[in-house]
Image (cartoon, rainbow, N blue to C red):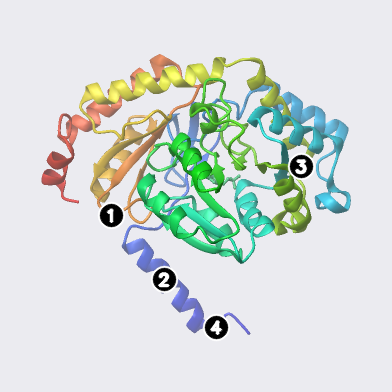
Amino acid sequence: MAYSSTIREAHSTQLSAMRDQGLLKEERYIHSPQSANITVEYPSGSELKSVINLCANNYLGLSSHPDVIQAAHTALDHRGYGLSSVRFICGTQDIHRELEGALSRFLGTEDTILFPSCMDANAGVFEAFLEAEDVIISDRLVHASIVDGIRLCKAMTDTYKHANMKHLEQKLDEHRDKRIRLIVTDGVFSMDGDLAPLDEICALAERYDAMVFVDDSHSSGFMGKTGRGTHEHFGVVGKIDVITTTLGKALGGAAGGCVSGRKEVVELCRQRARPYLFSNTMAPPLVAGALKVLEILSGSTERRDKLEANTKFWRQGLTDAGLVIKKGDSPIVPVMLYNAKLSQDVARDLYEEGIYVIGFFFPVVPNGQARIRTQLSADHDIPVLEKALEAFKRVGDKYGILGLDKKGIIEKYGM
Ligand SMILES: *Cc1c(COP(=O)(O)O)cnc(C)c1O
């Protein structure tokens, strides 16, 4: 069938409707490596602008680290550009197995299997080890890739209210008759920056004989005192049965993901997970880069310590300035504005001031919960953060929101 004019029209009507509602996502072009300071072209075709980056997942500042780049170069020379194969045919090099071992040691798990991304890990893991007689009980705010992975598996599904342990317990009780009860949560939730209470979750799992699954994409490398993740933060290393995480955020920021945990679960993924069996292996330079990242992080906590100090400074600075933030311990710091248009106006003015942030509103966050999500990096230095704080104060003052609480902002601007 041809792409008929009727269908073309239907599609462009759909796109115009998105544009009219202000829901069309526009990309900004970065003309420099990922870093605390980047050169951006926005809008498309306009002059390049040098800005302070407060919206990357480059938590540890390793995306453009010279040693990581060098390791990737070396692998490119010695192991080539790509393998043109999936793992189980002829896509596994010694370094792939080496990286799986290094990830197991870093995360404190029995075994690890690499995937092309964490999206793929989450798409494949559930159907690999769960059957129709099992149940998945997931937090209602888990990442989209988990939602998709759960859809692909035969197990029964249920949810509990976000981080609500009473509700989770009730669900565990309701599902006592199932073979496996799998509790599923993100470690750090990306929109609010809050943590799943893994100590309480593990205690419930023990009481109700349940397994625990944590996606630690927004924590691996820096949460916990040696940066192993939220399980270290809560003192439950070794108790999480399945961890998925990404190499595309703090751990170098290139690409790749993994499932790490009980060795039988990992082996079932190797035998059965479809994104593992049917998608290409990780490219050698990325594998070597990730190995170097883990070597750096295992040798010193300097980067996660700096990130923690930056986070404290930033949270305190925004609070002192009279802005409303979501409280917490993670380097994801949402500045709450509630009103969608206000979030876009403030983000645009900050960009003019040389601060690169994005305003999020419905449907990315609930209606009336619009915000600017700021993210800290170990690449930021205090003077840079001070400059960013000054810009937030100037723009906050322009909109008359400094010192206003939630109620005050909503009275002034509406939801
Ligand atoms: C970013 C993210 C992913 C996806 O990771 P990729 O490796 O980029 O596919 C999965 N889960 C969570 C919680 C994430 O934040």
Element assignment for label 4: loop
Mark 1 in CB contact with mark 4 (< 8 angstroms): no
Q: Residue at x 36, y 18 (%)?
A: 313
Question: Residue 90 at x, y = what percent?
Answer: 88, 49
Q: Is residue 201 visible?
A: yes
Vertical side of 168 occupied by 36: above or below: above
Vertical side of 41 occupied by 392: above or below: above
Check disc 3 and report the residue beneath it: 283
Q: Amino acid at mark 4?
A: Ser
Q: For this rendering, which residue is in front, 95 or 266?
A: 266
- Which quadrant of the rendered structure holds the N terminus? bottom right
Check disc 1 and report the residue beneath it: 367
Check disc 4 and report the residue beneath it: 4
Badge 1 local density, few (<14 within 10 Å), some, or many (20+)? Answer: few
Q: Judge depth for marks 3 and 2 and give the one in front.
A: 3
Q: Judge depth for marks 1 and 4 and give the one in front.
A: 1
Q: For this rendering, which residue is in front, 266 or 148?
A: 266
Q: Amino acid at mark 1?
A: Asn
